Amino acid sequence: MPVESVYSDLVGRLLDLTLPVHIETDAKGTSIISEGDDADKSLLLLEGWLAFTKMLPEGETQIIDIMLPGDFAILGSEYAPVSACSLDCLSDVRYLSLPSSRLNRDDPNLIELRKLMAAMIVATQARTAELVLRKGNASAANRTAYALLELFVRLQAINHVQDKQYHFPITQQQLGEFVGLSNVHVCRTMRRFERSGLISHPDSTHVKLDDIDALCEIAGIDLEVFANEILVRRPA
Amino acid sequence: MPVESVYSDLVGRLLDLTLPVHIETDAKGTSIISEGDDADKSLLLLEGWLAFTKMLPEGETQIIDIMLPGDFAILGSEYAPVSACSLDCLSDVRYLSLPSSRLNRDDPNLIELRKLMAAMIVATQARTAELVLRKGNASAANRTAYALLELFVRLQAINHVQDKQYHFPITQQQLGEFVGLSNVHVCRTMRRFERSGLISHPDSTHVKLDDIDALCEIAGIDLEVFANEILVRRPA
DNA sequence: CGGTGATTTGAGCATTCTCAAGGCTTGTGG
DNA sequence: CCACAAGCCTTGAGAATGCTCAAATCACCG
């Protein structure tokens, strides 16, 4: 399903403004931007999964945030033009690239657009805050369950979940880089979930959350409260 | 030193706009906002230290980000009005509270103001990304050295560092909540630094970084590159 | 000078990591 | 259609980092 139908307000507004916007595409594995690059622009993801990543000098990689279709992010701004992260394609992607200067003019249409962008920034910060919380204090099971639920909630909001099941294009290694575990321990944890009947793998690129209540229990979240925090509350 | 002189452009612009802005004050230990509260506003810190915090159900607290004088943060926005974090005073503070609606109008003065705000958001995201990176992969020494250097760089940018030394109003417990270590292990790590001559404590509320190069080595950062990423590059 | 809260140090324990090896799946070329 | 290669998943065993519990010391404040 094209995300345009879901996020039609934001995308529609952008296109209405006749901004010099063109859709770009990149293949899985490509790096759109590298840490330290100059980038005075924002990005709206239309299709696929993107990861903000950082590396320690020793080569350890960390995924800071995963962008899903419809998500918006500021990569850099005029007075802070250095990208703090790399931006890697976890799957094939389509996105809009938006120069900062185009979004900050006096134009009544932009007021509404900026409201939406502010909401997305707040949502992103909320997600990252949850990630930090879990990395600091939580067990491997907690973090893994949380990651599966976060993706579930966000994908559900854009109609990418069917029958508690969604497309999962990343490896256990990458999931580990996201939640802060070794690939080995991700595997153990997921296998444990599977054997307990919490999740299953209909095929190698999908995951199904069979017992969402149990996962919420392990992750320590109330699904409804959680969704309120990390999703943009769309204007009616 | 009043931060107004340093951040005069941002504060000055705010005051110039005759926005209905008034300075608020709160005492150390106070909670300005709680996780889940409605908050459709932003905040500009003038003096003192603030912490964004979150808690797991079991009671484990995590500091997500520390705000220092001059820092700006969006707490919530119209379409994402629920605060994802609590906001606690690590010291006595003075700050401006700014309703979102006031910052998003058609007004030439606001264009420049929004540029500054965008830069602060990017800087905050960069800091948080670094924090996530370190929580995921780094040792206790790395994380502790990093935290000390992050505060050093940020405080230096607002002239709050003298002779490699700065005011440090938080406990080891709180530092642990920030870097994701137990208070016991923070203590061990800091004592090790002290015995190795990397840091010292001129008095109980100050810390001095005696060997910054060694700390950078441990934290795995290049101070100049790092400053470029996490600081706002001020317009000339 | 007692009391409260913070820091310091020790000892044992637990979670997760690293290293290693085997199996499975997918794609490619003969 | 089969053989092989590459990448990913799975499982085991030992090692290490950081945690918890506990107790002693220290600093500040009324």
Image (cartoon, coloured by chain):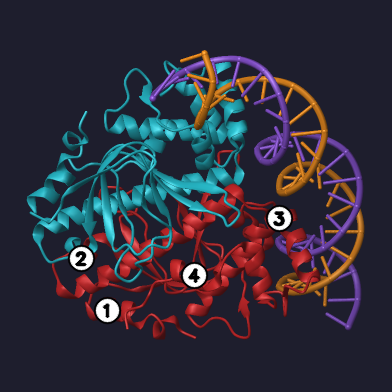
Chain colours: A red, B cyan, C orange, D purple
Instruction: Name which quarter of the figure residue A76 lies in.
Output: bottom left
Mark closest to the chain's N terminus, 3 or 1: 1
User: Which SS class for mark 3?
Assistant: helix
Q: Which residue is mark 4?
A: A225
Same chain, labels 1 and 4: yes
Question: How many angstroms separate mark 3 from mark 4 (CA)?
Answer: 30 Å
Q: Are marks 3 and 1 in contact (CB under 8 Å)?
A: no
Question: How many angstroms separate mark 1 from mark 4 (CA)?
Answer: 29 Å
Instruction: Check the residue under mark 1 and report the chain it is in.
Output: A
Mark 1 surroundings: few (<14), some (14-19) or many (≥20) residues within 10 A: some
Please state which amino acid type lies under the numbered disc 1: Arg
Q: Is residue A63 visible?
A: no
User: Which SS class for mark 4?
Assistant: helix
Front tag of 3 and 4: 4
Mark 3 surroundings: few (<14), some (14-19) or many (≥20) residues within 10 A: some
Front tag of 4 and 2: 4
Q: Which residue is mark 1?
A: A13
Q: Which residue is mark 2?
A: B101
Please state which amino acid type lies under the numbered disc 2: Ser
Query: Where's residue A199, x and y in %?
Result: 72, 73
